Amino acid sequence: MAHEDLLCACSGANYSIAGETLYLLLQRKGANFKKTRLSRSLADGHKSEVDVFTRNVDIRLKGNIIRTPLIALPYAKGNRTLLGTDFFTKSWHFFLNLKHCN
């Protein structure tokens, strides 16, 4: 299921989050998500339990595949895809070889 999308990097997020567009696209392509419940902590300190969907996806970076767990928030509307520290922990060595872009 190849699809190119613009992703945002978020060093403050522990996990990678699928934006609404990516989540809907994966659903339309027949991707299976697993429903689970997670504890969520916001920047203001507010904590809550939320229902989410999870799935592993392959993210291609400079020709390399990085298998990444992705969390989808079915109630979030208009959110963007965020790559969290879980992704960067697996892929930091690829970034060492990227040229600076202006």
Image (cartoon, rainbow, N blue to C red):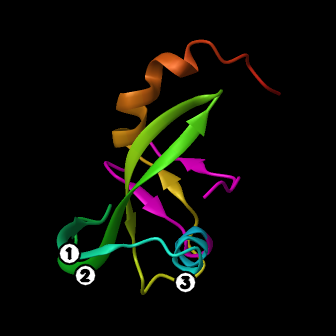
Circle on res. 51: 2
| Alpha carbon distance from label 1 to label 2 | 6 Å
**Mark carried by residue 36:** 1
Which residues make up the magenta segment? 1-21
Distance of mark 2 from mark 3, alpha carbons? 15 Å
Res 19 → quadrant? bottom right
Give me the residue at 31% from left, 48% from top. Answer: 14
Q: Earlier in the sequence, mark 2 or mark 3?
A: 2
Q: Secondary structure at mark 1?
A: strand
Q: Give the class, few, some or many, for how many residues have Cα within 10 Å of label 3's Cα (few <14, many ≥20).
A: few
Q: For this rendering, which residue is in front, 54 or 43?
A: 54
Helix, strand or loop for the magenta stretch, by majority: loop
Task: Assign a secondary structure to mark 3.
Answer: loop
Contact check, label 1 and label 2, Cβ < 8 Å? yes
Whole-percent x and y of residue 9?
54, 44
* Amino acid type for the residue under numbered disc 2: Asp
Task: Tell me if 39 is positioned left or right of 22 in this view.
Answer: left
Q: Are marks 1 and 3 in contact (CB under 8 Å)?
A: no
* Amino acid of disc 3: Lys
Q: Which residue is mark 3?
A: 77
From the viewer's perspective, is the residue at label 2 or at label 3 nearer? Answer: 2
7 or 42, which lies in front?
7
Q: Residue furthest top?
A: 97
The answer to whether residue 30 of the structure is visible from this angle is yes
